[in-house]
Amino acid sequence: QVQLVESGGGSVQPGGSLRLSCQTSGFTLDEYAIGWFRQAPGKEREGVSCITTSDGTTYYRDSVAGRFSVSRDNAKNTVYLEMNSLKPEDTAVYYCAATNRITSAQAMGVLSIIDGWYNYWGQGTQVTVSS
């Protein structure tokens, strides 16, 4: 059974940092791309980043590039999203998702963070950035 479980969310002041984890099970992590998405209240879900192991590449939406960093530890079946210099507009529920239809985050670019590509989803973790 495929499962993705996010953790690490919480409340932080602007400028602060959080590290989200996505613990996966039920599939071979290095055969899948992992995406991070977020949904703020009253807004549509949007893609944040993608990481693929096949070519070791990543992709970030413009608004988080340079502040967020995604990494994966295949031995632990876990993907991480390190979020620095957080802003109030980063407040959202963050989700990780998996797909075997993306083999290169860099090659696909913005397409790699389109949610329609993803088959499996976690339940989400809340991130709140507020003073």
Image: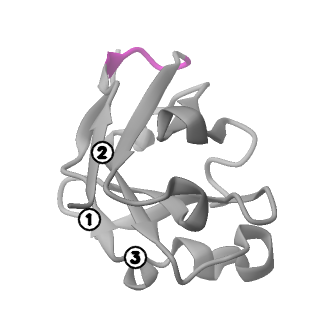
- Secondary structure at numbered mark 2: strand
In the image, residue 115 sits, relative to residue 26, either above or below, namely: below
Tag 3: residue type? Tyr
> Which one is earlier in the sequence, the residue at label 1 or at label 2?
1
> Which one is earlier in the sequence, the residue at label 2 or at label 3?
2
Tag 1: residue type? Lys
Q: Measuring 48% from the left and 38% from the top, which residue is drawn there?
A: 78
Is-magenta flag for residue 12? yes
Is label 1 or label 2 in front?
Answer: 2
Residue 109 location (% of width, % of height): 72, 76
Most prominent secondary structure in the magenta stretch?
A: loop
Say whether residue 81 is left or right of residue 65: left
Q: CA distance from mark 3 to mark 1?
A: 19 Å
Residue 118: mark: 3
Stretch of the chain drawn in magenta: 11-15
Colouring style: one colour
116 and 76: which is toward the camera: 76
Q: Measuring 53% from the left and 37% from the top, which residue is drawn there?
A: 81
Say whether residue 3 is left or right of residue 102: left
Q: In which quadrant of the rendered view does residue 125 lie?
A: top left
In the image, residue 123 sits, relative to residue 18, either above or below, namely: below
Is label 2 or label 3 in front?
Answer: 3
Is-magenta flag for residue 102? no
